[in-house]
Image: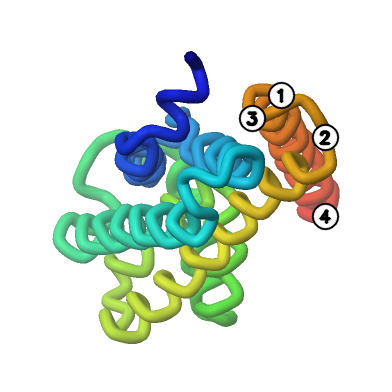
Amino acid sequence: MPTDLLTGPWALAIMSLLVLGDSFFVVIPGEIAVTALGAVSAASGSPPLWAVIVCGGAAAALGDATVYVIGRTVGTERWRWMRAPRVQRALAWARRRLDGGMATVLFTARFVPFARLAVNLVAGASRVHPARYLSLAGLAALGWAAYQASIGALVAAIVPGGPVVAVLVSVAVALGLGAAIDLVTRRVRR
């Protein structure tokens, strides 16, 4: 029964909504949804892996573009939470990174939830040209979705036990990789 929901017609829509929501609220498990559906795709053949990647990438790009528009229209100091010292440090970090190389920072920030939010807000507030921003953010979102779905598909191809086992193991692997990347990132910043 649990795989019926994951292979059914609503699976891609639910995954896309989670990814879209993850653009604003980083506690929503967008990455996990793409990884899990990648595992289900490889284990059961439904939904197709290409559809998981395209839907996940489109939802991520839409979310990033929406945050960009919010940054462009609202700025980065309108609401009290935006003026908090920790948020201001994150926004200053994003400004410096955008000035140093927008493509690199958009591709990198796509994998770091709070950095992604800060970079997209700052890109909008800094009035980065929309066509340039949208093309780079779209490519970054598609690359992110391909990576996340591929982790799930790879684990499902290696680990026996069907879709449920593949989902559980691929989510654990994705969380482990994320924790390792966070650890390395923190050490590099020091």
Label 3, secondary structure: give it.
helix
Would you name the residue on which mark 4 appears? 188
Q: In this view, does 112 lie to the left or right of 175?
A: left
Would you name the residue on which mark 1 appears? 165
Nearest to the observer: residue 25 or residue 187: 25
- Residue 76 position by quadrant: bottom left
Indicate which disc residue 159 carries: 2
Label 2, secondary structure: give it.
loop
Label 4, secondary structure: give it.
helix
Label 1 vs label 3: CA separation? Answer: 6 Å
Task: Give amino acid for label 4.
Answer: Val
Label 4 vs label 3: CA separation? Answer: 37 Å
The mark lying in front, picked from 4 and 1, is 1
Task: Give amino acid for label 3.
Answer: Pro
Q: Callout 3: 10 Å neighbours few (<14), some, many (20+)?
A: many
Task: Give amino acid for label 1.
Answer: Val
